[in-house]
Structure formats: structure tokens, C-alpha cells
Amino acid sequence: MARLRLLVFFALTALANAAMAQEAPPEDNSEEARGFFLAGRAAYDAGRFEEALERFETSYELSGRPELLYNIGLAADRARRDARALEAYEGYLEAVPDTENRASVEGRIRSIRMALNRDRVLREQASAANADAAASAQHEEADEGGVASKWWFWTIVGVVAVGAAVTVAVVATSGGTQDPNPGDFGVVLEGLGAR
């Protein structure tokens, strides 16, 4: 029974150590790297993901521990720095291929790739829409180049044409033989019976 307890204890210790590999500070002799790791973990726990990312990256540069790539990926992921998170997660899986959290890291990699592709498509669509809008604006500006393309110009032309046609019709029908009374101001009133 004691052997079984000892075996279970060692198995649990090994599992706990493997699970905590990403959370344990760097085990090299660099106190500076350890300090950056601890500062990064504190920043991450406080929700300051950009700061955590910077601290984890500095710790990784100083120590070279591949487990820190996972921490870098986590912080970049939470900071919505998708390209950096993807790079860190992929580097982590390359450096530590038999990690126990491989499936979850691969899941995050797939999600980030989908998000990056979606963002790329949206940027391309927005760029195409902007190009279409610019071309349309240029076309409208070209159409608006002359006075003849303005609505008000054609309204004035129409009013003048109608006025001229009415004047010609009035002159043609009156024959010009009737002299208006000076008090009529030149208006002939017919059919009203009085002048």
C-alpha cells in the first residue's frame, strides 16, 4: 500500500510539474529573467496584457526557455495581437512538441488563423469598396464639370423656351391690329364686356 501511495504521489507530482511548466518561472541562473517573468505574470493576472507580453518577451530573450513562448502566446492572444500570438504558439509547439496542452494550443492556433483570415477578407472588401467609392466620386466630378450638366441650367432654359413660345403665340394670335387703351397698360380684355 505504501508503494502505491508513493507511486501515486510521484505520478501526481510529475503531472503537476508538467502542467505548471508554463507558469513556473525560468529555471536558469538569470535572476533578471526570473524578475521579468514574475512581473509578466503579475501584469497578466491584473489584466494588463500588453505589459505582460512585454515582460514575458524580455524574460524569453534573457533565458531562451521555450515554455515562455506559451506565456507570450497567452498574453498576445488576450491583448488581441493575433499575429504575435500565432507566432508564439507555433514556436511553442515546435520547441515542445509533446506538451500536454498541445490540443488546446492547436485549437487556439486554428481560431487565430480563422480570425486573421476573416480580418484580411474584411480589409480587402473595405479596400475594394473604398476604391469603388473613389471611382464613383471621380465619375460624378467629371459629370459635374460643365454648366450644361446642372439641373438648374436646364430649368432656366425650359422657362425661357416656354416664355418665348407663349410670347410668339400671343403675338401671332393678336395680329397686332388692336390698339390697347392707355389705361389698360397694354392688356386687351376681351369678352368681359367692359373696358
Image: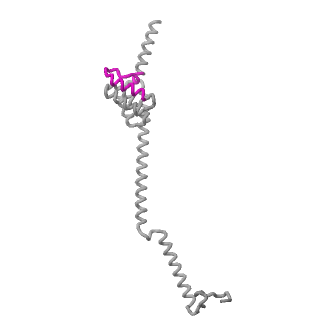
What quarter of the picture does the C terminus occupy? bottom right
Looking at the image, residue 189 sits to the left or right of residue 76; the answer is: right
The location of residue 88, given as percent across then percent down, is: 37, 32
Please name the residue shown 55% across and 82% down the image.
166
Relative to 3, is 178 on the left or the right? right
Foreground pick, 64 / 62: 62
- Is residue 89 visible in this depiction of the protein? no
Residue 26 visible in the shown view: yes
Residue shown at the point (46%, 9%) measured from the top left = 5
Up/down of 94 relative to 118, above or below: above
7 w.r.t. 48: above or below: above
- Image location (x, y in percent) of residue 47: 45, 31
Please tell me whether residue 96 belongs to the stretch shown in magenta. Answer: no
Residue 25 position, x and y percent, is 38, 22
Q: Which residues are magenta?
A: 20-43
Q: Is residue 8 above or below residue 63?
A: above
Q: Quadrant of residue 188?
A: bottom right
x and y percent of residue 157 in the render? Answer: 49, 75
Residue in the foreground of this view, choosing between 71 and 47: 47
Residue sticking out furthest to the right: 193
Residue at point 61%, 87% (across, down): 184
Residue 194 figure quarter: bottom right
The structure residue drawn at horizontal position 49% and vertical position 70%, both measured from the top left corner, is 152
Q: Is residue 23 magenta?
A: yes
Residue furthest front as drawn: 183
The rendered magenta stretch, by its main secondary structure, is classed as helix
Q: How is the image coloured?
A: one colour
